[in-house]
Amino acid sequence: MEQARRTRCRVATVTAALAAAGGLLLVTAAPASAEVKSTCGTYICVATAYQGRDYVQDVTVTTRDGLPGTLRAFVGDYRGSKANVSRWRFVVDREIRAYPRLAVCGGLDRGGRVVENHCVMIP
């Protein structure tokens, strides 16, 4: 009888832990409707996750040569920069109205000079 009670308690504990882990995955997972579009320039690649035509989730800027620099992301009124990295994800999470298309851009600066700006166009 005591062993059956312990077994039920363990089963309940494992079930609760699995339910909590599953709930955490649902909260942190990207929405099913998110799309990703990317393109590369001469020195950087820019990728963006977006929903619909107006909502930008994030922008990832990566140097093609793997060397660090000041990476920037800009879209609408959002401006973000990060120094001395070769890859960075900028979390935008905002709706930005643009007609007819939205340009989501990334940039690379080295030595105080703009090396390249490159944009992804969202239809």
Image (spheres, helix red, strand yellow):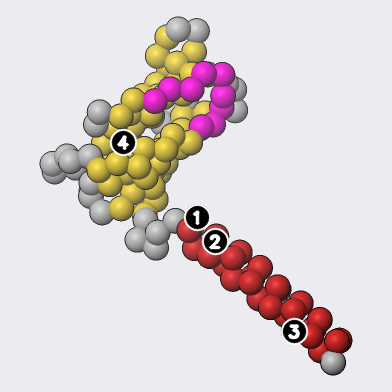
- Indicate whether 63 appears above or below 96: above
Chief secondary structure of the magenta portion: strand
Distance of label 1 from label 4 (alpha carbons): 24 Å
Q: Is 73 left, or right, of 1 in this rendering? A: left
Q: Is 19 left, or right, of 56 in this rendering? A: right
Q: Is 114 left, or right, of 21 in this rendering? A: left
Distance of label 2 from label 1 (alpha carbons): 5 Å
Which residue bears the numbered disc 3? 8
Which residue bears the numbered disc 2? 25
Q: Mark 2, mark 4: which one is toward the viewer?
A: 2
Q: What secondary structure is marked by label 1?
A: helix
Distance of label 3 from label 1 (alpha carbons): 30 Å
Residue interval drawn in magenta:
80-88
Kind of residue indicated by mark 3: Arg
> What residue is shown at x 64% (from left), y 72% (from top)?
16
Q: Quadrant of residue 52?
A: bottom left
Q: Are marks 2 and 1 in contact (CB under 8 Å)?
A: yes
> What residue is shown at x 44% (from left), y 56% (from top)?
30
The image position of residue 41, as x and y in percent, is: 41, 31
Q: What secondary structure is marked by label 4?
A: strand
Which residue bears the numbered disc 1? 28
